[in-house]
Amino acid sequence: MSIRGRAGAVAERGRRLLESDVPRDDLPWYVAPLPEPLENLGLNLAWLVVAINLAGTAFGFYYYLPQFFRTPAAMWPFVPDSPLATLLIAAALAAWKLDRQQEWLTALAFYGNVILGGWTVYVHLAFWPQFGYLHPAMRQFLIWSHAAMVVQAFLLHRIGDFRPWAVGVATLWYTVNATVDYFVPVLGDPHHTLIPLQRDTTVGLGADALSVAGAGAFLLLVVSVYLAMLTHVEKRRASRSSESLGT
C-alpha cells in the first residue's frame, strides 16, 4: 500500500472512532456537555477507558494504604473514595460492553465521578497554599486526572436512563458516605480523604477546614442528584418527541 493509501486508511479509522451506533438523545447541553464526537470516541474506546480507570483504581488503593491502617476494618468501604469511583465507572462500562448493564451501577458511577473528581479539584483550589508540600508534577496529576473523572461521567447518559430507583440507590450511598466522612464517623475519626491541615483550623469566614471540605462534597452531591434526575427527565422528553415525530 502506498503512503497515500496508508494515510487514507488511518484517516478512515480515525473518522470511524468519532462515529457510533449507540443512540444519542437530543439532550440539553447542561446534562450532555461533551461534543458528540468526543462521546463517540469514549464509547468506541470503552475497553481502554476501563483499563485506565482500573490502573487509577490500583494507584488509588495504594495511595490510601496509610489511611486504611488508621481506620477500623468495618469502615474500610468508606475510605477509598476516588478509587471506588473509578472502579465503579470501569465496572459500568465493562458491564455495558458485555451486555450486562446495570442501572444502579451506572448511577453510582455517575455520582462517584462527579462528586469525587470534582471534590479533589475543589479542595486543591480551596487549600492551594497548604498543598504546596506536594511535588508539582504529582499535584498536576491529581488535579487533571480527577477533572477527567468528571468529564468521563458525562459518557454515561449514552448507556443509562437514570431511572428514579437507580438514582435513589446512588443518592443513598453517597449521602451515607458524605455523612460518615464529615458528620457521624460511626467508628474512629471522620473518613474523608486527608486534607492538608488540621480539621479545626479556621480558614476564612469563621469556617474550619473540615466544614469547607464537607461543603464541597455536599454541594457536588446535590449537583449529582439534580443532573441525574434531569437527565432522566430529558431522555424521556426526547423519547416522546421522537415517537411523536415517527407517528
Image: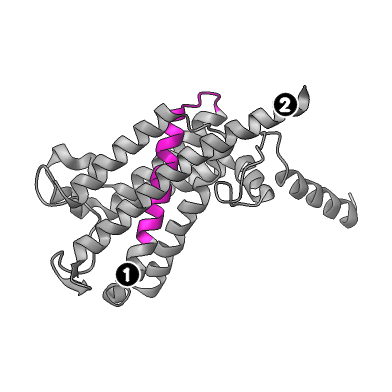
Q: Is residue 222 visible from the viewing direction of this image?
A: yes
* The magenta stretch spans residue 243: no
Residue at the spot x=70%, y=38% of the render?
20
Residue at the spot x=69%, y=31% of the render?
241
Q: Residues within 10 Å of mark 1 (few under 14, many from 20)?
A: some
Name the colouring of the figure: one colour
Q: The disc labelled 1 sits on which kind of residue?
A: Ala
Closer to us: 212 or 129: 212
Q: Quadrant of the C terminus?
A: top right
Closer to us: 48 or 192: 192
Decide: is 212 above or below 246. below
Majority secondary structure of magenta residues: helix
User: What x and y, as percent, mark residue 178?
Assistant: 25, 47
* The magenta stretch spans residue 101: yes
Query: Which disc number belongs to residue 25?
Result: none
Decide: is 128 above or below 237. below
Q: Does residue 174 appear left or right of residue 3 in this picture? A: left
Q: The disc labelled 2 sits on which kind of residue?
A: Ser
User: What x and y, as percent, mark residue 201?
Assistant: 15, 70
Residue at the spot x=34%, y=43% of the render?
84
Decide: is 26 above or below 192. above
Q: CA distance from mark 1 to mark 2?
A: 48 Å
Decide: is 119 above or below 102. below
Q: Residue beneath label 2, please? A: 244
Of helix, strand and loop, which one carries label 2?
A: helix
User: What x and y, as percent, mark residue 133?
Assistant: 27, 75
Marks 1, 2: nearer the viewer = 2
Q: Residue beneath label 1, please? A: 126
The magenta span reads: 98-120
How many marks the image carries: the answer is 2
